[in-house]
Image (spheres, coloured by chain):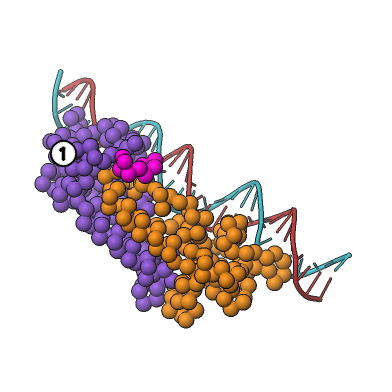
Chain colours: A orange, B purple, C red, D cyan
Amino acid sequence: MFSKACEYGIKATLFIALQSLQDQRVNLKDIAKEINSPVAFTAKILQQLAKNNIVDSVKGPTGGFQIEKKRIDKIRLSEIVSAIDGDAIYKGCGLGLKECNANKPCPLHNKFAIIRDDLKEMLEGTSLYELATGLEVGLTFLKR
Amino acid sequence: MFSKACEYGIKATLFIALQSLQDQRVNLKDIAKEINSPVAFTAKILQQLAKNNIVDSVKGPTGGFQIEKKRIDKIRLSEIVSAIDGDAIYKGCGLGLKECNANKPCPLHNKFAIIRDDLKEMLEGTSLYELATGLEVGLTFLKR
DNA sequence: TTTATATCGGACAAATTTATCCGAAATAAA
DNA sequence: TTTATTTCGGATAAATTTGTCCGATATAAA
Ligand code: SF4
Ligand code: SF4
């Protein structure tokens, strides 16, 4: 469904959001430990997220990553996914035709487009805040 | 969503089904041409489909691939997908946790499982026959 | 029986994704 | 000002997926 990079990206962002809600900035090592991901690879993904203004990064001692509190309920999962995986998952054809074109659809079009659009709506309708609260109260988990 | 191998597999199977409905056996070259796929790679995928008894293969001159007519409305998309991509798409966690476990869910669980189950139902509820008819009347396409 | 044609199966190669390494740049604290 | 710490960014490596090649095997037809 999502690439590994995207999975790590979502988990990392959620952890940063959770910590930011508690006014804590977190560094790369702690993020990778929390989400059980390869440190250096996670660094790359965080760089990408920072470039896309999804997270803020601060260099130097006491540095790390954070998200402005007031933005946490504004940021949608869809932003993270398209920053890392692009928009193929929203726009792409289920059978890999060059472009999705309802006027010359693949055999799966009718049935596939419904699922794809539901996924799109789900990602666009889900904020970081919403998911972070489940984490906060220990109802959901970033690793197992 | 699906791997390239799976996309080719679905398209190839659909074309074979379409031809089988007209009592025609088709060979590798014609399949690859019809679905616009790399010939040798397609051969590997067809081998896999034959091993999984999704298509029948016949060697030698006039040989090729076919599907028993009466099975075409029995075979579901889900069989092709799990033969090639395995069942990660049905069972896997949206955020890549080792196993999907609703008792220790990832933050996306509630929203993701719905989409994933819809996809599963769609694939399990869709037969080759159903998709082949759209192709037959020129309403849908395997390449563009 | 010979030949031509087709899939099968294994080895290999290219491309992409995932992951690592390390020096540069920034910056907080000593 | 120096040092330690942290992210940044580019090069490189490993793993996986995608794609190719070619001989072996089966078989229909000449
Ligand atoms: S919208 Fe168009 S072409 Fe599409 S999946 Fe559906 S597709 Fe294939
Ligand atoms: S079903 Fe939902 S889950 Fe269980 S862990 Fe999953 S995505 Fe995460």
For the residue pair A107 and B102, the one nearer the viewer reads as A107
For the residue pair A105 and B43, the one nearer the viewer reads as A105
Q: Is residue A79 visible?
A: yes
Q: Position of residue B65 (x, y in %)?
A: 21, 38
Q: Which residues are magenta?
A: A97-105
Q: Which residue is mark 1?
A: B20
**Residue A104 sits inside the magenta stretch:** yes
Magenta region, mostly helix, strand or loop? Answer: loop
Residue depicted at x 39% and y 48%: A92
Q: Position of residue C22 (x, y in %)?
A: 69, 55
Q: How many marks?
A: 1
Judging from the image, what secondary structure is the residue with disc 1 in? helix
Chain under disc 1: B
For the residue pair A58 and A21, the one nearer the viewer reads as A21
**Residue B57 sits inside the magenta stretch:** no
Q: Position of residue B39 (x, y in %)?
A: 33, 35
Q: Is residue B56 visible?
A: no
Residue depicted at x 43% and y 57%: A2
Looking at the rendered structure, the kind of residue marked 1 is Ser
Residue depicted at x 63% and y 72%: A25
